Amino acid sequence: YEAKGGRIAWETKTPPQFGNGLVTSGALYAPVENAIVRIDAESGKELATISIEGSEEPPGSLFSDGTRLYSMSPGEVRAFELK
């Protein structure tokens, strides 16, 4: 929602999420089934999908140190380079 008037600025559909997403300057990251979806913070448009293949665990909650994106699920921890 926008701070003024409670009006929705944008809305986008994603597959069911597994864990907490992450907000960075300019983008949001949503952990979905076997991928992480990068969404433009200004427009809500999907920018990219990071596929996670070879794992039986969904991505889980996301964290970042500004250089890497970390995914923590009950059975795995993964690190991805941010570009």
Image (cartoon, grey):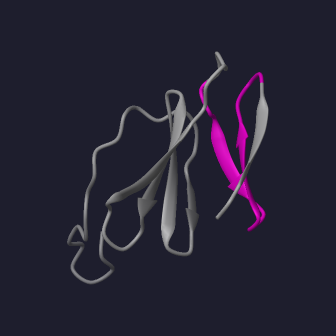
At a point 46% along the width and 35% down the height, the residue shown is: 17
Q: Position of residue 36 (x, y in %)?
A: 53, 42
Q: Is residue 59 above or below residue 39?
A: above
Image point (78%, 63%), residue name:
65
- Of residues 81 and 20, which is closer to you in this image? 81
Q: Quadrant of residue 44?
A: bottom left
Q: Quadrant of residue 13?
A: top left
Image check: 15 left or right of 35? left
- Name of the residue lying farthest toward the top: 56
Foreground residue among 74 and 57: 57
Taking the image as shown, residue 79 lies to the left or right of residue 8, namely right
In this rendering, is residue 55 above or below 25?
above
Q: Left or right of 47: which side holds 34?
A: right
Would you say residue 69 sits in the magenta stretch?
A: yes
Is residue 54 rendered magenta in the image?
no
| Image quarter hosting the C terminus | bottom right
Horizontal placement of 49 versus 1: left or right?
right
Q: Classify 30 as above or below 17.
A: below
Q: Image point 64% across, 15% down: which residue?
A: 56
Q: Position of residue 18 (x, y in %)?
A: 53, 32
Placement of the N terminus among the 4 image quadrants: bottom left
Residue beneath the point at 25% across and 71% down: 9
How far from the left and from the top, in percent, is residue 39? 42, 58
Placement of 61 over or under 55, stated as above or below: below
What segment carries the magenta color?
Answer: 58-75
Q: Quadrant of residue 23?
A: bottom right
Task: Residue 25: give x, y in percent of width and height.
Answer: 56, 75
